[in-house]
Image: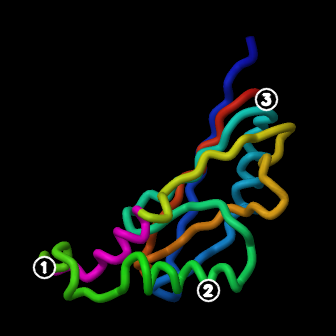
Amino acid sequence: MPEVKAHTHYLWFNTKKPQEIINITDEVQRQVEESGVREGLVLVSAMHITASVFVNDHESGLWQDILHWLEHTVAPWSPDRYHHNDTGEDNAAAHLRSLTVGHEVVIPITDGALDLGPWQQVFYGEWDGQRKKRVVIKVLGDA
């Protein structure tokens, strides 16, 4: 029976803008390679409740559409409309955006590589940035 390997790595972000979408696919693949796992899974998870990790297409027009959709349909940045902001916070919209987009993904690893579809990439979505946040990459599988 093969031995299961585990590898953990943290990515740190301190975005320049309150909202950003950052392609982290290459770094996730790099961690898969460092782990030595040939067959398994990688979990990529935002460790903050106002950020997301998701898989989608790497296309700037789509990113603009996602940001517009979040701002105008899902959770407009309007501090006076949310009960959470009555506590002195102003980031309720970021919490709702994270809840909508999701905070983690699990990606299969096949033959030592991320097993993604032809247009799929892994992204970090920051919805309340300009402060230090992190993402955990956890690789599990057989060497």
Q: Which label sits on residue 27?
A: none
Query: Dot 2: few (<14), some (14–19), or many (≥20) neighbours within 10 Å?
Result: few
Which stretch did the figure color magenta?
Answer: 88-99
Q: CA distance from mark 1 to mark 3?
A: 51 Å
Q: CA distance from mark 2 to mark 1?
A: 30 Å
Q: How many marks on residues?
A: 3
- Residue 123 is situated, as x and y percent measured from the top left of the image, at 63, 66
Identify the residue at horizontal 75%, vertical 61% (top origin): 120
**Closer to the camera: disc 3 or disc 2?**
2
- Residue 117 is situated, as x and y percent measured from the top left of the image, at 80, 54
- Residue 8 is situated, as x and y percent measured from the top left of the image, at 59, 44
Q: Is residue 43 above or below residue 64?
A: above
Q: Quadrant of residue 99?
A: bottom left
Counting residues from the start of the chain, the first of labels 2 and 1 encountered is: 2
- Residue 104 is situated, as x and y percent measured from the top left of the image, at 53, 53
Q: Which residue is mark 3?
A: 143
Q: Is residue 89 covered in magenta?
A: yes
Q: Determine the secondary structure under disc 2.
A: helix
Q: Determine the secondary structure under disc 1.
A: helix
- Residue type, mark 3 in image: Ala
